[in-house]
Image (cartoon, helix red, strand yellow):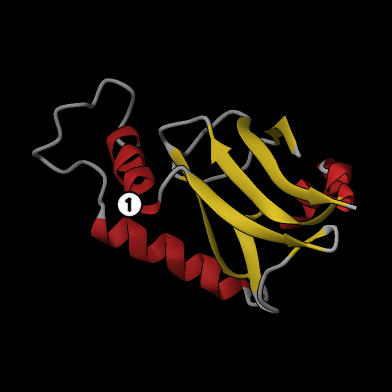
Amino acid sequence: MWFQKEIRLPAVKRGFHLITDLLTAQLPELENYRVGLAHIFIKHTSASLCINEDADPTVRQDFESHFNHIVPENAPYYRHTMEGPDDMPAHLKAALLGSSVTVPISDGEFNMGTWQGVYLCEHRNHASKRTVVVTLQGEGY
């Protein structure tokens, strides 16, 4: 069985933000799946998704620091600069991390590791709300 839903995420500041609980709260349909996959796709080119540690917030801070180091603002070779100094770096960061994640579903819940969570990786300084498309596929009860 298949199910698809768009979820509007709240606007957040630049950085790496856990959205696992928000997704779960917006997807009561998960409980209908005995086994399956949740594909989560972000409909933006300056934000991304990834899965990583959900316990220690310094991990998310280190992600932000590292990505700012490897993809700096105001690089003299950027040509796409009309939308501000954070725009082209945001596109590059999103390309590095990707626009989707896939999470197994087992017994009506996301089946991730003990310390794993889904991150919204916001790469713009003043971003608006973001939208993700979640597609559930699997066998029901």
The one of 60 and 117 positioned closer to us in this rendering: 117
The one of 129 and 136 positioned closer to us in this rendering: 136
Q: Residue 139 at x, y = what percent? A: 78, 50
Q: Dot 1 corresponds to which residue? A: 96
Q: Is residue 124 left or right of residue 75?
A: right
- Mark 1: secondary structure: helix
Dot 1: within a 10 Å radius of its alpha carbon, few (fewer than 14), some, or many (20 or more) residues? few
Dividing the picture into quarters, in which one does residue 53 lie? bottom right
Q: Residue 23 at x, y = what percent? A: 75, 47
Q: Residue, x 60% and y 32% (percent of image)?
A: 130
Dividing the picture into quarters, in which one does residue 45 lie? top left
State the residue lying farthest toward the left.
77
Q: Is residue 27 left or right of residue 97?
A: right
Q: Residue, x 53% and y 52% (percent of image)?
A: 101
Is 105 placed above or below 95 here? Answer: below
Query: Where is the N terminus found, in terms of image quarters?
Result: top right
The one of 48 and 133 positioned closer to us in this rendering: 133
Q: Residue 111 at x, y = what percent? A: 72, 67
Q: Quick check: can you spot residue 100?
A: yes
Q: Residue, x 21% and y 41% (percent of image)?
A: 74
Q: Residue, x 88% and y 48% (percent of image)?
A: 32
Q: Is residue 22 left or right of residue 102?
A: right
Dividing the picture into quarters, in which one does residue 133 lie? top right
Is 22 placed above or below 4 here? Answer: below
